[in-house]
Amino acid sequence: MARIIFRNANVFDGVDPIGKADVVVEGDRITQVGPSRAEPRRSDDVVYEVAGKTLMPGMTAGHGHLSFHDLTLPRIMDVDMRHPAAYMGVLAARNAQRTLEAGFTTYVGAGSVHNLDVVLRNLIADGVAQGPRIVACGRDFAPTGHALDYKPEHWNVQPLTPAGTLGALCDGPDEFRKEVRREAKRGVDMIKLYPEGGHGLPKRTVRLSEAEIATVVETAQLCGLRVRCHAYSKPVIKLCLAAGVAIIDHGDHLDEELAELFVKYGTYVLPSLYLAKMTAGIYHTQKDCDGWFAYARKSLKMGIEAGVKFVTGDDFGLLELPHGDNARELAVYVEDLGLPAPAVLRWATSHGAAMAAIPDLGRIAPGQLADLVVVDGDPLERIAVLGEPDRIALVMKGGSIAKSMISAVAHATVEPFQLPAGSRPRR
Ligand SMILES: [Zn+2]
């Protein structure tokens, strides 16, 4: 089997920068990571000379909506009704490809319409469509009257309609139990629950009861699914954690007590503050955004030091957050909030892969899946380089090259095996 070798790379291994190394890929796996020229090369090796470039694990988009496209919040009412499912599916496939080409080889869904996360996950796994590995999510679970119960009463739309709708609007544990099982039948991996509003939604809204949250989590676990919760406030986050929620989206009111609980429960937390920056002056004021950032500057720093497992991911699919811009989120944490770049790179690589629960992913080490990105620059020096498409020089997923702007060295120029000093080549 021909090997692919990245030579002289500056390696960020998903946890730390490890300096200059050669990384060898065979099949879908990384087989060696070591000093450059550690061994003789074979004539059929495919060699990429990447001196001066960074090699890092493929990133994880931990929150997103591949089936949304150019969405504005006032138009979310009919996001599931404007186009037939097939039209949305073609758009979603293109969004998946853009995400992959931006260096994101894993995607953890946070809500989709027409069951498109599941459809895409299967098309990509079958090799029909190009895109990241997908952890599929379906409808948004919320109660009647919640901010996500968008459709006006006079439209006369039945709340518990099929998979195409945005919201699974349920009331009481029995309805939630039934709908979670319906989602399991449709093949999702993840349930998205909205126990409250806030973070882009009105704070004053219908909230879920403790019994409803617990029922969703218990039923999901019985179906082999995990639950992620849109939650910002301390009391609601505590209810979610007690019930066994795996992922908290946003967690805006992070404090020391919550950080301790997140660490204790092993909860993944996605601050998702790119949305706040990109929609300042549209859905909220710049002053609001400045206030949130002032709080996050301290609370996220504290959370990192406490050991909270933060992950990157935001509402890509909104008009202001187009698919493929995913890496621009990282710059918010480093440049706007002053957090350390290695920590934020961990959020996007090793933390994200662990949250996706895909074994052997998110690190550059022998035995790991070969999901790799070659960056023309050093994201530890200037993290914004990750958001510049021309700087994402190569993307590999599972040993296959999904995007490449650099050429492999031709076989003829591969240097011959160096014989030990004093020996003579045989004729
Ligand atoms: Zn979202």
Image: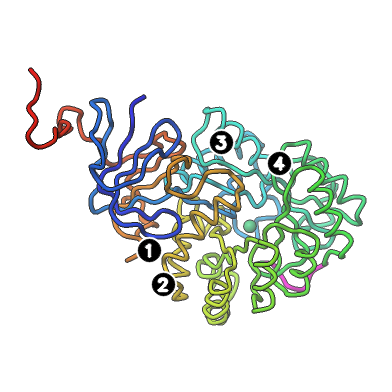
Say whether residue 138 is left or right of residue 404: right
Tell which circle, 3 or 4, labels the residue nearer the N-terminal end. 3
**Residue at coordinates 86% horizontally, 53% vertically from top-left?**
170
Q: Regarding mark 3 in the picture, which secondary structure is present there? A: helix
Image quadrant holding the N terminus, namely top left
Percent across and percent down for residue 11 are: 34, 53
Magenta residues: mostly which secondary structure? loop
Determine which residue is flagged by label 3.
Answer: 90
Q: Secondary structure at mark 2?
A: helix
- Magenta part of the protein: which range? 201-206
Image-quarter location of ligand 1: bottom right
Residue density around tag 2, few if under 14, some if 14–19, many if 20 or more, within 10 Å: some
Image quadrant in which the C terminus is located: top left
Beta carbon at label 3 within 8 Å of ligand 1? no
Tell whether 129 sits left or right of 202. Answer: left
Q: Which residue is mark 1?
A: 383
The residue where tag 4 is placed is: 188
